[in-house]
Structure formats: structure tokens, C-alpha cells
């Protein structure tokens, strides 16, 4: 049995190797043309044949490398494992960008363990436990267009093409560059527009890149000071939240007694993440009061 940190480092290497192969596949498919294969939660929530092909490849490679692990993929991959490790896979995060030929898309692969928070202390944002009951222990996010590989494992730091990265040290929200994203349904987007309307005068600027995995890796690399988004799925964030945390970012929910996840993910250097959390709490309080 490998010591835990050696196992996690091995899992990170597996994630990076497979993300690279899947990234090369989808970049090649992109060059030969991409069409919508199906829609999901709305007409704008699309899946392409490349999403499906990449997820099949990743699942096959994971089964070869780690036959006793589970797999959970955005496009339907569901393998029950016996090892305690479940791989959470987004074959193309930033699918709409990919469909339109915009460069901001990534392959995200995370090795996770399932944990229930035995007590509130464990359910702190420091534990890395997410609202979906999983904690990433290793992962990789690969950007095929720029050739940037973000890789990480618990306690091993976060690396970009092998070089350690560190989150921003910005503490002042009014000069912070903040990333966010918007959902696929009209109702959710209306709510998110109200939140960003309130926030935009209070920050340097907003960036909407269209991939949560890339947004969180940009926080890890200090290219965004902060990030927040509501409505993400485990495959959107599993690997990149660990990249951000290992780069020194704090990852929060909107309320301190909640775990980050679908309801809200906030990431940034500790003091800035708290300031962003405070603004978002107030924005949603105002929305709730206005709704009566
Ligand atoms: C996307 C996220 C992005 C969000 C989009 C979409 P997908 O994931 O990465 O942050 O704003 O609405 O959910 O659908 O490209 O895998």
C-alpha cells in the first residue's frame, strides 16, 4: 500500500496524463467541426459528440489505470468502484465556448473520496469537503488551446506545467478582478444578473470566461483575484477547487454553516474571499427581501 501522499501524487499523474490525451482528442475534433448532439437543462445547455467521445476515452483510460475505482462523468459515465476513490470527470468544461470555437475550454479530472462531515469542525471550508459529499485528493485541469496543465494533489501544492502557482494576495475588493458565470435557465440568469449588477460597482471588473474549471485555475494562478458562481456541478469544480486551495485560495459557501458546492462557490485569497462572501450574502438578502 502506497503512503497516502505517494498515492495522491500518483493519482495526480494519472489525471494529467489522461487529461492531456483527452485534450488532444477534443482539440482535433474541434478543428474538424463541431455540432450539437443534444441539449440538457435548456436549449442552450448543449452536449457535443466530442464531449461524449472524450468522456468515453477518459473512462476507458481510468479503468485501465485504476480498475477498482469509481467514475462519475458529466455526460453519463457512472462506474461504481470498490477502492474508495471515485474519479469525477468533465470531458469539456466550457462546452459552449468549444461549440463556438472560443479557446476557453478544459478537460477536468479529479480523484475524490466520499466523506460525511462527522461534525461542524470537519465541515469547515478548510477540510476541502464539498456539498456533494466528496473531497478531491488529486486532479488535473488541461486547457488544450494554450497547452496549460494545472495539476495538484492534497498537500502537494498546485502546479502549472510543473511550476508552482500561488493565488493573488489582493485584499481590497474594490480593485479585485472577479470571475463568475451564469446558468442555463432564464430564472437562474435573471437572479444572477441582479447579483452581478449589485457587485460590479464594488470591484475592479468582472470576467465571465465560460468555464468554472478555468476560472478556479485562474484564481490559483493569480490571474483572477476572486471567483464566485452558483449552480455548478461536481464535475465543473472538483479538480479546480483543489488546484485553487492548494495554491493558497480559500473556498467558501455563501453561509459559514454550509459547504461550498451547487448553491455557491466563492474562491480567493482568504480576506478577499470573505469580503466577496459578505457582498454576496447581502445581495441575496436584498433579492430575498425584494421577492417578499
Ligand atoms: C459550464 C461552467 C461555467 C458555467 C456554465 C456551464 P459546462 O460548464 O463551467 O462556469 O458558467 O454555465 O455550467 O456546461 O461547459 O460543462
Image (cartoon, rainbow, N blue to C red):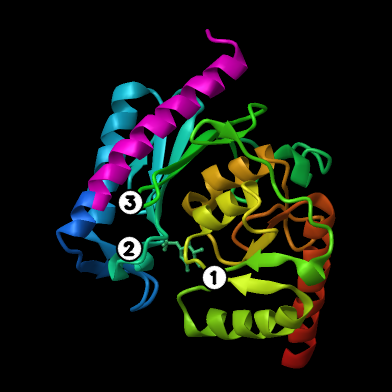
Q: Identify the residue at image location x=75%, y=73%.
A: 203
Tell me the residue that label 2 is attached to: 98
Q: Which residues are magenta?
A: 1-27
Per the image, label 3 sits on a secondary structure element best described as: loop
Marks 3,2: beta carbons within 8 A: no
Q: Nearer the viewer, mark 3 or mark 2?
A: 2
* Residue 134 can be seen in this image: no
73 or 196, which is in the foreground?
A: 196
| Ligand 1 under 8 Å from disc 1 Cβ | yes
Residue furthest toward the top? 1
| Ligand 1 under 8 Å from disc 2 Cβ | yes
* Marks 3 and 2, the one that precedes in the sequence: 3
Q: Residue 208: give its label.
A: 1
User: Would you say 271 lies left or right of 136 here?
Assistant: right
Per the image, label 2 sits on a secondary structure element best described as: helix
Q: Residue 76: give its label.
A: 3
Q: Main secondary structure of the magenta part?
A: helix
Q: Nearer the viewer, mark 3 or mark 1?
A: 1
Q: Identify the residue at image location x=19%, y=58%.
A: 31
Q: CA distance from mark 2 to mark 1?
A: 15 Å
121 or 278, which is in the foreground?
A: 278
Q: CA distance from mark 3 to mark 2?
A: 19 Å
Amino acid at each position: 500500500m502506497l503512503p497516502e501522499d505517494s498515492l495522491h501524487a500518483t493519482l495526480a499523474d494519472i489525471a494529467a496524463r489522461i487529461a492531456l490525451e483527452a485534450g488532444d482528442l477534443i482539440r482535433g475534433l474541434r478543428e474538424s467541426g463541431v455540432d450539437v448532439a443534444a441539449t440538457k437543462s435548456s436549449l442552450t445547455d448543449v452536449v457535443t459528440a466530442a464531449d461524449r467521445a472524450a468522456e468515453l476515452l477518459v473512462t476507458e483510460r481510468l479503468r485501465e489505470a485504476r480498475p477498482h475505482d469509481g467514475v462519475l462523468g458529466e455526460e453519463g459515465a457512472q462506474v461504481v468502484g470498490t477502492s474508495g476513490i471515485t474519479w469525477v470527470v468533465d470531458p469539456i468544461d466550457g462546452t459552449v465556448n468549444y461549440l463556438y470555437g472560443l479557446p476557453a475550454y478544459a478537460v477536468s479530472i479529479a480523484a475524490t473520496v466520499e466523506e460525511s462531515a462527522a461534525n461542524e469542525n470537519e465541515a469547515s471550508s478548510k477540510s476541502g469537503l464539498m456539498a456533494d459529499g466528496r473531497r478531491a485528493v488529486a486532479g488535473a485541469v488541461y486547457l488544450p488551446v494554450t497547452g496549460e496543465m494545472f495539476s495538484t494533489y492534497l498537500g502537494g501544492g498546485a502546479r502549472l506545467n510543473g511550476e508552482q502557482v500561488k493565488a493573488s494576495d489582493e485584499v481590497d475588493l474594490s480593485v479585485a478582478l472577479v470571475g463568475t458565470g451564469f446558468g442555463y435557465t432564464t430564472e437562474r440568469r435573471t437572479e444572477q444578473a441582479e447579483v452581478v449588477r449589485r457587485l460590479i460597482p464594488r470591484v475592479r471588473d468582472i470576467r465571465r470566461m465560460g468555464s468554472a474549471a478555468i476560472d478556479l485555475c485562474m484564481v490559483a494562478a493569480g490571474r483572477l483575484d476572486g471567483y464566485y458562481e452558483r449552480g455548478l456541478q461536481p464535475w465543473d469544480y472538483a479538480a479546480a477547487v483543489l488546484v485553487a486551495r492548494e495554491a493558497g485560495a480559500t473556498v467558501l459557501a455563501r453561509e459559514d454553516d454550509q459547504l461550498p458546492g451547487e448553491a455557491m462557490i466563492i474562491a480567493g485569497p482568504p480576506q478577499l474571499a470573505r469580503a466577496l462572501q459578505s457582498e454576496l450574502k447581502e445581495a441575496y438578502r436584498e433579492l430575498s427581501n425584494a421577492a417578499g
